[in-house]
């Protein structure tokens, strides 16, 4: 689910200009592309953390790099940059995941989280990937799709299934009408990976460092595969399985999200004195599913029904920092019938009409990255199995992705990942990550012979680097600082460096008291 809840307003102003220098040799797109000068200036609609000056620019790239130059449409990428405080020795390009998530604000967020010596030496660059955020053209579909309450994701009858299937088909059709085929046919991970190289060239950098979270790990891995000579250091955090195309990946994800939700239920049970929902995970899970049933009968404030609850509490599988407020809202409803907390957490983490752009861009990338089943019976059969094994998100994940069964742009070939051309990579993974199960990190390490894997043992949150774990952050800083990687562990089934988990959050004792805070790099509302 796209990251639409990060606060963003007006940014600091500054004016710098950087000439475009070397273009990638040997590629037709680069050979035919005119040199561009990035005009850095004020950032519209973004607010950087205090003391983190950020400037923005726009870069024109081809929509279809395979088309003849005379027939090639273009897109404009929105970029951001936080300059090094002292002499620049490297450029760090960051991506928060998604797909579909704008990334400009992450230059400032990442710069603010770096150790002082790296902050002094790095230019940190963020960008809104093609079709997202302030980049143009942008994907848009149907904001009314999110009007609450939406139909229950768990179908009880064939008519329910038909309604939900029709909604998926209608949304896909709306994306085609509103966005148009030129953009939808060129939103793949490979397209965005080549955009990163265009950003590198426009910055005048021979090589760049890259930090990607979640889906950003696949994007970074494909960039390294396609442009290995343009990568210096590569950090991939919360790793997408490189050999598991999206349909299969989402079925696996439904099971891992369910397991991650059990961590939330177990934590809530350990704090029964604060929440009163039971002292076992089974009891607190029953409170959640009981609330879900209640909302199916009477949505909170007429708007938060079972689907809205699911999409809100999906956040629990992404970030432990959100557990106190989610548990408090569940407790207030279960014990006192108070729905105010549920509506509040839905406003914070649930979907709304503003989710349309990020959801549409998510689909535009996933639907064209690989082939998808076109027979809806396949989806329905797999949904029944997923719900039986993983009811927390089993059906929800089916409907979330089903527009790909009707997508106007064809599914392509799953992108190749081969990291043998780069000198090294640092992979970071929480052991109990729900959105990107841990086996993906081991599979990615196999594709990068020089790579090392840092595992947060018992870690439960998605997005670990620069989030406050000293062991993890130290390994990331050492690698970015001078390329130092942990020693190889020597076993294919074990991490190269094992770190202890971050501390659990403290419970929220009273309504409105959400102890703890999100890590600076946490992205709890990313679907992928």
Image (cartoon, rainbow, N blue to C red):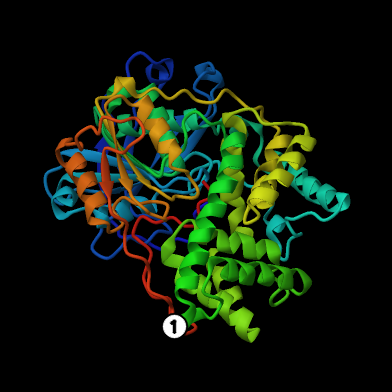
Q: Residue at x 50, y 35 (%)?
A: 75
Q: In the picture shown, does residue 340 fall above or below 304?
A: below
Can residue 7 be seen from the camera position used here? no
| Residue for badge 1 | 509
Front-most of residues 25 and 483: 483
Q: Secondary structure at mark 1?
A: loop
Report crowding for label 1: few under 14, some 14 to 19, many 20 or more residues within 10 A (C-alpha).
some
Front-most of residues 334 and 295: 334
Can residue 187 be seen from the camera position used here? yes
Could you say where residue 131 lies in the image, as x and y percent from the top left? 53, 41
Could you say where residue 213 lies in the image, as x and y percent from the top left? 40, 45
Could you say where residue 191 lies in the image, as x and y percent from the top left? 49, 29
Q: In the picture shown, does residue 316 fall above or below 301?
A: above
Q: In the picture shown, does residue 349 fall above or below 205?
A: below
Q: Residue at x 65, y 49 (%)?
A: 389
Could you say where residue 157 lies in the image, as x and y percent from the top left? 86, 53
**Label tally:** 1
Q: Residue at x 46, y 41 (%)?
A: 215
| Residue 455: quadrant of the picture | top left
């Amino acid at each position: 689910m796209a990251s639409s809840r990060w606060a963003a307003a007006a940014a600091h102003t500054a004016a710098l200009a950087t000439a475009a220098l070397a273009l990638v040799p040997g590629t037709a797109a680069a050979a035919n592309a005119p040199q561009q000068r990035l005009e850095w200036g004020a950032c519209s609609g973004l607010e950087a953390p205090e003391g983190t000056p950020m400037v923005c620019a726009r870069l024109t790239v081809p929509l279809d790099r395979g088309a003849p130059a005379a027939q090639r449409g273009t897109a404009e990428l929105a970029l951001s940059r936080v300059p090094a405080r002292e002499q620049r020795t490297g450029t760090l390009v960051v991506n928060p995941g998604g797909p579909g998530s704008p990334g400009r604000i992450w230059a400032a967020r990442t710069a603010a989280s770096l150790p002082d010596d790296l902050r002094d030496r790095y230019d940190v660059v963020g960008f809104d990937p093609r079709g997202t955020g302030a980049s143009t053209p942008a994907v848009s579909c149907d904001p009314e799709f999110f009007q609450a309450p939406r139909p229950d994701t768990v179908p009880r009858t064939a008519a329910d299934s038909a309604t939900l299937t029709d909604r998926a088909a209608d949304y896909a059709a709306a994306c085609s009408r509103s966005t148009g085929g030129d953009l939808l046919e060129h939103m793949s991970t490979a397209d965005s990976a080549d955009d990163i190289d265009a950003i590198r060239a426009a910055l005048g950098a021979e090589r760049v460092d890259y930090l990607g979270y979640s889906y950003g790990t696949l994007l970074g891995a494909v960039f390294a595969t396609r442009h290995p000579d343009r990568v210096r250091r590569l950090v991939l955090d919360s790793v997408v399985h490189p050999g598991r195309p999206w349909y299969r990946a989402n079925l696996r994800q439904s099971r891992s999200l369910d397991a991650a939700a059990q961590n939330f239920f177990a934590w809530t049970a350990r704090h029964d004195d604060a929440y009163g929902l039971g002292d076992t995970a089974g009891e607190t899970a029953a409170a959640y599913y009981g609330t879900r049933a209640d909302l199916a009968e009477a949505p909170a404030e007429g708007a938060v029904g079972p689907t809205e609850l699911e999409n809100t509490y999906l956040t629990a599988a992404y970030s432990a920092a959100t557990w106190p407020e989610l548990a408090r809202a569940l407790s207030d409803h279960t014990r006192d019938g108070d729905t105010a907390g549920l509506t509040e957490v839905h406003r914070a983490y649930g979907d709304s009409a503003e989710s349309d752009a990020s959801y549409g861009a998510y689909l535009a990338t996933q639907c064209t990255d690989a082939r998808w089943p076109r027979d809806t019976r396949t989806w329905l059969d797999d949904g029944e199995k997923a719900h039986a094994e993983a009811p927390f998100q089993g059906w929800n994940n089916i409907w979330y992705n089903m527009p790909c069964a009707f997508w106007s742009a064809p599914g392509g070939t799953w992108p190749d990942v081969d990291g043998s051309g780069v000198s090294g990579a640092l992979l970071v993974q929480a052991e109990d990550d729900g959105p990107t199960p841990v086996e993906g990190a081991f599979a990615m390490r196999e594709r990068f012979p020089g790579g090392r894997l840092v595992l947060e043992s018992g870690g439960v949150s998605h997005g670990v680097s620069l989030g406050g774990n000293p062991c993890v952050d130290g390994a990331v800083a050492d690698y970015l600082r001078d390329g130092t990687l942990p020693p190889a562990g020597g076993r294919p089934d074990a991490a190269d460096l094992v770190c202890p988990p971050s501390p659990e959050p403290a419970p929220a004792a009273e309504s409105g008291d959400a102890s703890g805070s999100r890590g600076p790099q946490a992205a709890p509302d990313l679907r992928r």
